[in-house]
Amino acid sequence: MSFSHVLASGRPLDAIDLDGFRAGMRAWASGVTVLTTGHGDRRAGLTATAMCSLSAEPPRLIACVNQRGPSFTLMRETGHFVVNVLAQEQANIAACFASSKDVDRFAIGVWREGDYRGAPVLEAALCCFECAIAEIVDAVSHGLIIADIKTVHVSDGARPLLYAAGRFSKLEDETIDPRHSFYF
């Protein structure tokens, strides 16, 4: 597959320093996902927090993936992947898929072939989006993958795994309704 866009790789003269960037990003709490892909006996996956919705019409999302890894290479080759949004009990799966060790990442958790093109889907995930790659934007070290959502699976009652300040955490039981600033 070929994709069209390339973002400038030069550092702007007025950019913040790397320490400032890292400090700011560590303060940002995010949901945790494991992106998976596969074709035949070949499977790959990685832990990612850089994923968000792009549009509802058509249903699309964006995932940011390091281009130097084997998971990105296989995603580009197959043209599809799954965003497995992790539940708070799945920090061990996130840690395994984030590891640089050469281990069988799919040995942890219960995995099945997805409905759309058979990429690995995590059975007990908070939700899973099976996606077809629509476009990849080259953004220096990462590919901004724009994907069409083909199927979604949602687990009732599960709570999200979060990542902030270099560690995994979970939501507190007390939540605030943002429309009214009331606790409920």
Image (cartoon, grey):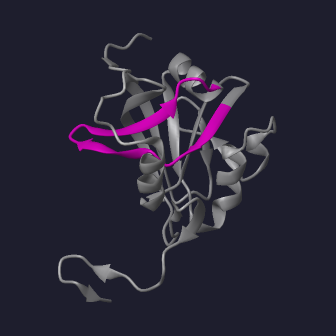
Q: Nearer the viewer, residue 108 or 49?
A: 49
Describe residue 54's horizontal placement relative to residue 43 as left or right: left
Which region is colored magenta?
A: 44-69
Q: Nearer the viewer, residue 109 or 70?
A: 70
Q: Compared to 66, does 158 lie above or below?
A: below
Work out whether residue 20 can be spotted. Answer: yes
Residue at 30% across, 89% down: 183
Q: Compared to 163, does 172 lie above or below?
A: below
Q: Compared to 173, does 37 lie above or below?
A: above
Q: Residue furthest top?
A: 2
* Magenta span includes 149: no
Work out whether residue 135 can be spotted. Answer: no
Residue at 42% across, 50% down: 20
Residue 94: give x, y in percent of width and height: 64, 52
Residue at 49% across, 27% down: 80
In which quarter of the view is residue 51 placed?
Answer: top left
Residue 163: give x, y in percent of width and height: 53, 60
Residue 13: give x, y in percent of width and height: 30, 29
Residue 61: give x, y in percent of width and height: 35, 40
Describe residue 95's horizontal placement relative to residue 140 as left or right: right
Residue at 41% across, 86% down: 174
